[in-house]
Image (spheres, rainbow, N blue to C red):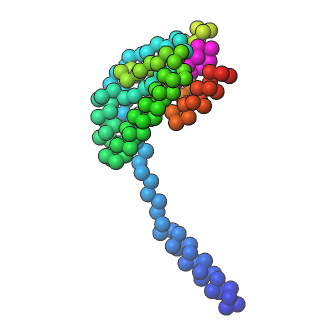
């Protein structure tokens, strides 16, 4: 009986300690919208790099802590630099499209179907879409660009 009492007392203490613990989560920050409403039309096999325009970048800077902003811009710069090297060395047949002053990407497939992507809906500050007119465009992970290009274009 004494053992039972001491076990239940410890369980009550644990429950009261757990109730006091609060989890603080950082707020989810949505990327500010583009300063432009232009559309880029893509019809050929392409790699489309998107980045924020200068005004959008300033807005992104104001809603993030300096360390966070520095980290995401650093990561973006080096991942895009690596992706450009891979494209130049191994996929030079792809057209490279730069989208920094456009909000929409309009992909026109070989069967005349159109796919429009609103870059304001992409919360990353930068990225790459790859496109083959026979397929839907695909947003790829820049860190795995070698593999992603192979899987997408050689299927």
- Give the total number of marks visible in the rendering: 0
- Relative depth, front residue between 64 and 44: 44
Question: Compared with residue 7, is residue 133 higher up or lower down, i.e. above or below?
Answer: above
Residue 28 left/right relative to 7: left
Q: Is residue 85 visible?
A: yes
Q: Residue at coordinates 43% horizontally, 26% vertically from top-left?
A: 50
Residue beneath the point at 51% across and 68% down? 19
Start-end of magenta stretch: 129-137
Residue 132 picture quarter: top right
- Expressed as whole percent of the image width and height from the top left, the position of residue 78 reads 42, 36
Residue extending farthest bottom? 2
Q: Is 132 covered by the magenta stretch?
A: yes
Between 41 and 82, the one lying in front of the other is 82
Quarter of the image holding residue 39? top left
- Residue at point 31%, 35% (across, down): 59
Horizontally, residue 113 falls left or right of residue 57, namely: right
Q: Position of residue 129 (x, y in %)?
A: 51, 25
Report the front residue among 69 and 6: 69
Q: Position of residue 136 (x, y in %)?
A: 59, 20
Foreground of the two, 141 or 111: 141
Snapshot quadrant of residue 125? top left
Quadrant where the image shows the C terminus: top right
Q: Main secondary structure of the magenta part?
A: loop
Let me know if residue 123 appears in the view.
no
The reply to whether the magenta stretch includes residue 47 is: no
Percent across and percent down for residue 72 are: 40, 40
- Quadrant, the N terminus: bottom right
């Amino acid at each position: 009986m004494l053992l039972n009492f001491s076990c239940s007392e410890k369980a009550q203490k644990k429950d009261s300690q757990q109730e006091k613990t609060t989890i603080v989560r950082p707020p989810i920050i949505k990327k500010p919208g583009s300063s432009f409403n232009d559309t880029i039309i893509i019809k050929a096999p392409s790699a489309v790099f998107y980045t924020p325009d200068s005004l959008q970048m300033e807005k992104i800077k104001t809603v993030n802590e300096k360390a966070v902003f520095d980290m995401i811009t650093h990561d973006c710069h080096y991942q895009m630099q690596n992706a450009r090297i891979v494209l130049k060395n191994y996929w030079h047949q792809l057209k490279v499209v730069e989208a920094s002053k456009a909000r929409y990407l309009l992909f026109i497939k070989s069967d005349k179907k159109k796919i429009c992507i609103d870059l304001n809906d992409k919360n990353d500050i930068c990225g790459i879409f790859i496109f083959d007119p026979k397929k839907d465009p695909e947003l790829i992970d820049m860190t795995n660009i070698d593999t992603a290009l192979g899987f997408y274009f050689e299927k």
